[in-house]
Image: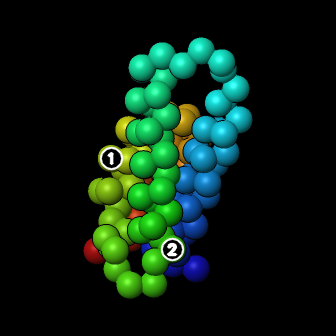
Amino acid sequence: MSNEDIMKVLAALGAIISLIELILGYDERNLDSSRVILLVISILLATFILLTIITPHKFIGVNWLICVVFGIIMIVYTSLIGGILVLIAGFAGYAERP
């Protein structure tokens, strides 16, 4: 299994875990504006990562730099575990570079 395949699997797993964390953490009754903004950011990041992995044609090529940036954003703003997996996927993709 090449590093690119490992990067795709880890990024998809991180996006799915991020969506699961989002669904499980959405149990609060009081929604203020910052909570709604973080909810929208996490949905957009997770679906964008899944779209880059799942689509057969190149929506945006899975690049190690995209995974690193999205992993950092996910760790800081939305999902810790999913962000760490996406960040590790970016580092795995970087290790494949010649």
Q: Is residue 85 above or below residue 10?
A: above
What is the tally of numbered marks visible in this picture? 2
- Spatial distance from mark 2 to mark 1, Cα to Cα? 19 Å
Report crowding for label 1: few under 14, some 14 to 19, many 20 or more residues within 10 A (C-alpha). some
Taking the image as drawn, is residue 94 in sight?
no
Quadrant where the N terminus lies?
Answer: bottom right
Q: Is residue 66 above or below residue 32?
A: below
* Residue drawn at (66%, 30%) of the image: 25
Taking the image as drawn, is residue 32 in sight?
yes
Depth check: give the residue in front, 24 or 96: 24
For the residue marked with disc 2, what is the amino acid? Answer: Ile
Question: What residue does disc 1 label?
Answer: 69
Report crowding for label 2: few under 14, some 14 to 19, many 20 or more residues within 10 A (C-alpha). few
Depth check: give the residue in front, 59 or 27: 27
Q: Is residue 64 above or below residue 96?
A: above
Quadrant where the C terminus lies?
Answer: bottom left
* Residue drawn at (58%, 45%) of the image: 18
**Percent coordinates x, y for residue 61 in the rendering:** 33, 73
For the residue marked with disc 1, what is the amino acid? Answer: Val
Q: Do residues under tags 2 and 1 come within 8 Å of each other at their CB atoms?
A: no
Q: Nearer the viewer, mark 2 or mark 1?
A: 2
Identify the secondary structure beneath mark 2.
Answer: helix
Q: Name the image quarter holding residue 9.
A: bottom right
* Residue drawn at (39%, 55%) of the image: 67
* Residue that extends furthest to the bottom in the rendered view of this protein: 57
**Percent coordinates x, y for residue 41 in the rendering:** 41, 39
Q: Is 54 left, or right, of 21 in this rendering?
A: left
**Percent coordinates x, y for residue 69 in the rendering:** 33, 47
Q: Name the image quarter holding residue 65.
A: bottom left
Question: What residue does disc 2 label?
Answer: 54
